[in-house]
């Protein structure tokens, strides 16, 4: 898996799903724009216009790739090919010091921020559906999403900057030191685990055949003693709150639809093991450190150590964002069930055709006319399509 952090899709473009329901867009859309501007500003770059970085139409999210690529290029100075002079090596390049400071700040702040978001997500899933908690959760969805988005982008940009510094400072050594790092590193562990589940399923065709015949209420216990059953339960423990579209709240979580997980895993693309890639980077760095002179060794070792630490945390930042959207789904489904009972919604999944502010108004009683609610839902249904959100 080659590194392509600089030449392919900008890291920030992955903050939002390519397709989203109005509910998801209303949570993440404006936050993502604000977070991107703030994160880049902290690193010395200001977007030249106030034009929206992401656009939403008919359920599709489109990023301004040109604007994001220009921002990333400005920060990482990818066009620079000048070898550092001895004075630069001794005194330290300004850009390198900035990258190191950004990475250091991310390393200090990110773990606590991710842990705080995770605690909130666990609280939401454990909370009983009462009016007081309903109101509390709906007011906290956006702040938690902003924390997760900001943390994920801070880490992603720190990784991109450190990668650029390695390429510029050690062009002959950089490729193996950056092995396995690409714009999708945040989901690498999930994608690897999903593909491994698929390989386990291929190895047990009898179990898969039983699943395809039909799902009775006891289908999971029937797999419990098989290797596939063990692998399935392990995957659900680690990724049960992920989904086919993990950043769209309308996408059912695997814990809700485990019967479909094996079939999905069979179609998953096999990807390299991110843990093995990390080990290979470390081995390459050890060899490179012995190769360079003492002055460059100190520079290389410090830069690479930061890169490895940041790379490990990027996945935690993405997991925090997925967790927020899973919690936002749980809250929305609760609101949808309540609205379906009193007729404001025809079906529970219709809740994802409403925006967060509309749901807030519906749950506080400000918007209680069933005819008006249904009219909005029906109008949006004409243009927005998504998978089964039940």
Image: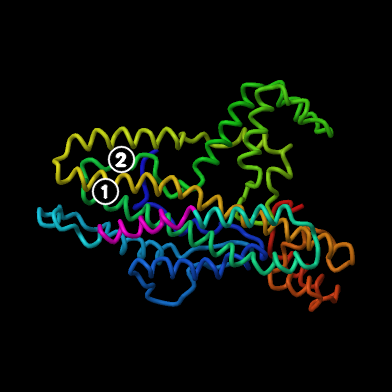
Q: Is residue 353 within the magenta segment? A: no
Between 3 and 156, the residue placed more toward the observer is 156
Q: What's drawn in magenta, residue-wise? A: 96-111
* Displayed quadrant of residue 43: bottom left
**Would you name the residue on which mark 2 appears?**
177
Give the main secondary structure of the magenta stretch. Answer: helix
Residue 203 located left or right of residue 105:
right
Per the image, label 2 sits on a secondary structure element best described as: helix
Residue 2 located left or right of residue 196:
left
Q: Residue at x 19, y 54 (%)?
A: 81
Between 16 and 377, the residue placed more toward the observer is 16
The answer to whether 354 is drawn above or below residue 259 in the figure is below
Q: Residue at x 71, y 38 (%)?
A: 260
Q: Which mark is residue 200?
A: none
Query: Picture coordinates of residue 196 (x, y %)?
Result: 56, 31
Q: Is residue 104 within the magenta segment? A: yes
**Would you name the residue on which mark 1 appears?**
166
Instruction: Tell me, yes or no, whether the two marked residues, 2 and 1, touch with CB atoms within 8 Å.
Output: yes
């Amino acid at each position: 898996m080659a590194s392509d952090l600089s030449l392919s899709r900008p890291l920030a473009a992955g903050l939002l799903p390519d397709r989203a329901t109005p509910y998801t867009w209303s949570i993440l859309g404006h936050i993502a724009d604000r977070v991107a501007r703030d994160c880049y500003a902290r690193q010395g770059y200001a977007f030249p216009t106030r034009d929206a970085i992401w656009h939403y139409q008919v359920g599709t999210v489109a990023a301004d790739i040109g604007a994001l690529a220009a921002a990333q290029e400005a920060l990482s100075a990818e066009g620079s090919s000048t070898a550092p002079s001895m004075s630069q090596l001794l005194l330290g390049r300004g850009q390198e010091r900035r990258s190191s400071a950004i990475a250091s700040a991310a390393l200090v702040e990110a773990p606590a921020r991710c842990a705080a978001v995770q605690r909130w997500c666990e609280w939401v899933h454990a909370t009983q559906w009462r009016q007081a908690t309903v109101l509390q959760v709906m007011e906290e969805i956006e702040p938690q999403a902003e924390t997760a988005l900001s943390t994920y982008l801070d880490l992603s940009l720190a990784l991109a900057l450190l990668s650029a510094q390695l390429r510029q400072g050690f062009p002959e050594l950089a490729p193996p030191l950056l092995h396995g790092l690409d714009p999708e590193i945040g989901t690498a562990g999930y994608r690897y685990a999903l593909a491994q589940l698929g390989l386990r399923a291929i190895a047990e065709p009898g179990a898969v055949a039983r699943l395809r015949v039909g799902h009775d209420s006891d289908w999971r216990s029937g797999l419990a003693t098989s290797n596939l059953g063990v692998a399935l339960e392990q995957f659900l423990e680690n990724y049960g709150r992920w989904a086919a579209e993990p950043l769209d709240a309308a996408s059912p979580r695997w814990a809700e639809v485990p019967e479909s997980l094996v079939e999905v895993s069979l179609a998953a693309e096999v990807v390299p093991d991110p843990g093995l890639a990390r080990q290979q980077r470390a081995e390459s760095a050890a060899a490179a450190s012995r190769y360079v002179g003492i002055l460059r060794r100190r520079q290389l070792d410090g830069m690479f150590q930061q890169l490895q630490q940041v790379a490990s945390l990027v996945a935690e930042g993405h997991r925090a964002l997925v967790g927020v959207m899973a919690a936002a789904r749980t809250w929305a489904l609760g609101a949808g069930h309540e609205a379906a009972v009193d007729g404001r919604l025809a079906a529970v999944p219709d809740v994802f055709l409403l925006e967060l502010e509309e749901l807030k108004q519906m749950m506080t009683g400000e918007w209680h006319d069933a005819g008006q609610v249904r009219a909005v839902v029906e109008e949006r249904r004409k243009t927005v399509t998504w998978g089964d959100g039940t």
